[in-house]
Every structure is written in C-alpha cells, then in structure tokens.
Image: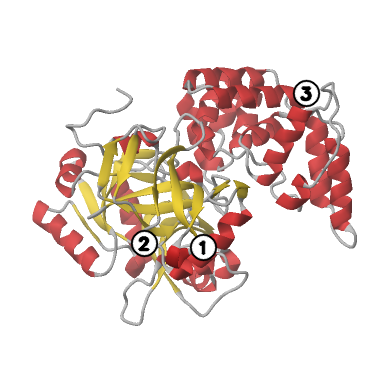
Amino acid sequence: MLLSEVVDTSAAVAATRSRLAKVKALSALLRGASADVVLAVVSFLIGTPRQGRIGAGWRTVFDLSVPPVEQAGLTVAEVDAALAEVAATSGKGSAQRRVDLLAALFGRATEAEQDFLRRLLTGELRQGALEGVMLDAIASAADVPGETVRRAFMLSGRLPETAVAALAGGASELEAFRLEVGRPLRPMLASPAESLDDALAELGSCVVEHKLDGARIQVHRSGDDVHVFTRTLREITKTVPELVELVRGLPCTSVVLDGETLALTDEGRPRPFQETMSRFGAQDERELLLHPYFFDCLHLDGKDLLDEPLRDRLAALRQVAGEHVIPGVLDPSPSEAAGVVTAALGAGHEGVMVKSLASPYAAGRRGRAWQKVKPVHTLDLVVLGVEWGSGRRRGWLSNLHLGARDPDGGPPVMVGKTFKGLTDELLTWQTKALQEIATEQNDWVVMVRPELVIEIELDGVQVSPRYPGGVALRFARVVRYRPDKDPSEATTIEEVRALLPTAQPNPEA
C-alpha cells in the first residue's frame, strides 16, 4: 500500500463533518491494506506511529529541508521500517544519524506526504477523537459487530492490534481477547448527572460513593508481580512503590483493581490535584505518599469479573481491599444518599458517583450506568490557543482559547475563552509549556497543538454565533490542567450543548 493512499484518506476524513463518510473512507482503506501493514496504517491514521516516540523532536522534524518528489511511490511498509530504524538509533552520533535517516525518508516523499509525516512525528496529526470512528470503520471493514470490536479494544487497550485481529480473523479472533493480568484495559467512564435525585431515579438499585479529587489508577497483581497504570494506560509502577507494596500485601494471589489515588494532608484531607499528579511524572519515588481508594474489582484469583454485575464485583472488592475500598453506601435511601454527598464534600472531595448495581464493566465508553454528581458544572476542554496578557500579566500567556471534542473525529470545536482562575504559578508554567507546542504565533496569540486538557468551571452555556460550536461558556474559570486525560476524553460539543437552558434553542436543531 502506498503512503499516498493513507494521506489521501486522512485528508478526506478531515474534510468532512459526516461520520458516515469518515467511516466509509477509513473502511475502504482498511479493506485494501495487506495484513502486514494494517498495524502501521491504523497507527498512522490515529496519529501515533507504532514505534511511539522515535527520538526526534519537533525542531528536528520541522528543520528538515528536503525537496519533495513529484510522483508518489513511497510505501507504508517503507515508512514503517524507516521509523523503526530511527527509533532504534542510539549511542554516540545518534542525533545526526536520526536526522540523516529522516532526511532520506522525506527525500522520497511528495509535498503532501512530507506534510503528513511532519504532523505524524510531532503529534499534530493525533486525533484521539477519531477513535470511535475508527472502531466503526474496523467493524465495517471486517464485517463484524461493532460491540465485538469495542470489547476487544477494551481488553487489548490497543486500537491497531484490535484492527489486525479483526481483519485477520473476524469475530472469532476478536472474541479470543481476554483480560490479561499485567496488561491494562481501558477504564469505564461516567456521565454527568443533572442532580442526585435524577441519578437515583434513573439507576434504581445503586451504590453512592465519594468522588475523590485524585488520579485514576488501575493495579494488576499476579503473585508478587505488581503493575500500576494511569487512566491513559501509562505504566507508573516504578514511581509509586508504596502502592506496589500495599497491593502485594492484599489477601489474594491475583487481582485487577480500579480506583483512585491521592496525596493527603496530615489532617487526612486531599492535597491539590497537581501534587498527586507530580508523582506520576516523576522518574523515581518522592517523599509525598499516595493513598489508594479502590472502587471496582475486575479479576480475583483466576476469575474474570468484567461481566458480573457491580453488586458482585463490590463483594469481591470488599473481600480483597478491605479498608482501602472507597467510602459509599449500597442501595441508600434518598436521605442516606444526600448524607453521602454531605460527607464527601465535607471531606474535601468533588461530589459523589452513583452507579447501577446491575451494570457490567463497560470500559472505554461514557455510558449512563455510572453518573457523577458535583455541586458545580465542570467541563474537560482542549486548549487550542492562548493570548498574551496585558497589564500585570504582560509577558505571560493568559487568555485561553477552549475547544470541545468533536465526537465524529473532527478537530476540537471552539466554545469560549477564559483567563480567570490562573495563579501566577500556573501562568508561569503555561507560558513555557504552551510555547513548546505552538503551531503558529504572533504578537497577540499563540496557537497550539490540541493535546492539553484543562478542567473548566462555569455557570452554564448560552447560544452564541461567536464560536463555531454555536454556544459560549458563561463565567468560565480554570480549575486545573488534567495531565491524566487525553483529548479523546474531553467533553464533546454535544455535551456542552446539552447544558443549554431548555428555553434556548440547540444551535444544531
């Protein structure tokens, strides 16, 4: 398969708002891919080479000045092999060797292919929002049910590998995926509830738990072998030895647990989220101790529990995690549920989670079986750009441009701006970090790659022709950056529009 076929398909997908058109284009490309390049093709299309980071930074890639060829002839297999060689280069002189290898690759590419490769290698092509569209395209290309593809993806955690299995062996190959202790699976997600009463009425038999202001973790143990992963499936085992030691001491031989971890003050209250996240980015352990709180058990002593109802999974959780189970009440009365909310907020947490006790573990999807109840509206939005400050903020990047995720795989949709809530410390960090991912800038604004997620608190939204999404945020302020979240987990434009007052028309209606 020629790289030009992938480039043309990527351009066609970016040019249309139609989800069906995107699926059709991707499916046609996958059908035409030979088995040996499917892994690379899907990796390219979702914006992440299968080799991951290849050791060449943004400046190295964009400083390449190589005349393009006129006629497309570069194959996907040749590009994949070249990137593998670049990634494997190390030792003395490796930096120049990487430049030489990339120059040779670019010298065989057309202008459109060079542009595609630059964006692929610098993260500008990455569109996590394309994930759902790609899953539908894989199902279409392999002629298998979409739910079968999604479940295999949940269990493997890897979209390219899921595509390979689907196209090579169809449903039977996908159904062979099993939970594997030591391999992370995609976490189950929650949807916002209108209110506690609404969540209780919708879910019926449920559990109401504290919603902690911590970081999501997934722990796997087989014997003495323990692994700890973040919500984005990144392994952090070496930086959290206290969690590893705790999990090794649980009364079991094998287990997979889902939960949250956070740093606490001496009084037992949660420290700021950024302090918890500082441990996740560390190269080794720090003095700040993390405390885990588990809320689900996906495997215990050789038995997979994913398809068991939550009520049974919680019984297994209490059996193995004991005092480390997150506080909550099963089948509470309305007054008991309200008491859980009061206790959670009083302890310094965000609110509560309300979960159906009949629900299986449906990873990777933001369904209604789990609902979060918080006292204020917050959205996880993508930073699109930022304006230089004035007055006291002169010299800092201050006013943020914010976008919601397009669920059909398009670029984020701008819904507002804000400079409120930014501390001097955050302004200093933001000014440096955003310039490092800049795509264009002038004396007024810096546009950036859409890869940072930020949590925004707001009073609501209103119809507005000012922004492409047709809505604007009201009284938005920054709560914090979310390094634990990928843009594919950002709030969708549909979810933003759902906050419109019922008296206001939906701009898409």
Q: Are marks 1 and 3 in contact (CB under 8 Å)?
A: no
* Foreground residue among 124 and 54: 124
Mark closer to the chain start, 1 or 3 = 3
Q: How is the image coloured?
A: secondary structure
Mark in the foreground, 2 or 1: 1
Task: Specify few, some or many for label 2: CA neighbours under 10 Å numbering under 14, 14-19, or 20 or more.
Answer: some
* Foreground residue among 249 and 410: 410
Where is mark 3, residue-wise?
A: 2
Mark 2 to mark 1 CA distance (whole Å): 14 Å
Q: Secondary structure at mark 2?
A: loop
* Foreground residue among 64 and 303: 64
Along the horizontal axis of the image, is 319 left or right of 459?
right
Q: Position of residue 468 (x, y in %)?
A: 41, 32
Q: Position of residue 197 (x, y in %)?
A: 14, 46
Q: Secondary structure at mark 3?
A: loop
Residue 269, numbered circle: none
* Foreground residue among 168 and 382: 382
Mark closer to the chain start, 2 or 3 = 3
Type of amino acid under label 2: Gly
Name the residue at 63% across, 35% down: 160
| Above or below 462: residue 89 | below
Q: Secondary structure at mark 1?
A: loop
Where is mark 1, residue-wise?
A: 396
Mark 1 to mark 3 CA distance (whole Å): 45 Å
| Above or below 177: residue 434 | below
Please identify the quarter of the rendering in which residue 460 is found. Answer: top left
Along the horizontal axis of the image, is 209 left or right of 287?
left
| Above or below 131: residue 320 | below
Where is mark 2, residue-wise?
A: 421
